[in-house]
Image (cartoon, rainbow, N blue to C red):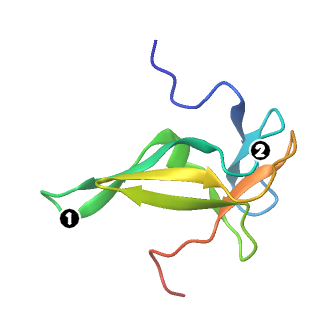
Amino acid sequence: MYRPLPKYLTIQPSKIEGLGLFSLKDIAKGEVLGVSHVTDYIYKNLIRTPLGGFVNHSEAPNCMRVKIQRYHYIKTITDIKAGEELTLKYSEYSV
């Protein structure tokens, strides 16, 4: 059965912005959480998955995006506690 998010992640209101992605369990540093974006070579853009659609920006993130061919994965770069919001440092946009 298709699951848009792993069973141990949920979407809830964020103190950062709108809705965010939160962990329901402790997650170890170095764990790959799944595909967040897929490169569309025809239209030359990124397609977000549900996993990638709710991760908020942080200057001190606890996750990073790793690209392997056309797939972008979210990988934890710190230990994550249950209830903690998952964050990335956005790199696609300049402020």
Q: Secondary structure at mark 2?
A: loop
Query: The C terminus appears in which quarter of the rendering?
Result: bottom right
Mark 2 and mark 1: span between their CA atoms?
34 Å
The number of callouts visible is 2
Instruction: Rate crowding at label 2 as few (under 14), some (14 to 19) or many (20 or more) other CA atoms within 10 Å.
Output: few
From the image, state whether disc 2 or disc 1 is nearer to you: 2
Task: Give the image location of residue 66, x and y in percent.
Answer: 48, 59
- Vertical arrangement, residue 3 with respect to residue 68, above or below: above
Q: Secondary structure at mark 1?
A: loop
Residue that appears at 77% across and 41% down: 27
Q: Is residue 90 left or right of residue 44?
A: right
Q: Which residue is mark 1?
A: 44
Q: Residue furthest bottom?
A: 95
Task: Identify residue type, mark 2.
Answer: Ala
Task: Give the image location of residue 75, x and y in percent.
Answer: 60, 52
Q: Which residue is mark 2?
A: 28
Does label 2 or label 1 sit earlier along the sequence?
A: 2
Task: Give the image location of residue 7, x and y in percent.
Answer: 66, 24
Q: Is residue 85 left or right of residue 65?
A: right
Residue that appears at 81% across and 48% down: 80
Q: Nearer the viewer, residue 86 or 75?
A: 75
For residue 7, the mark is none
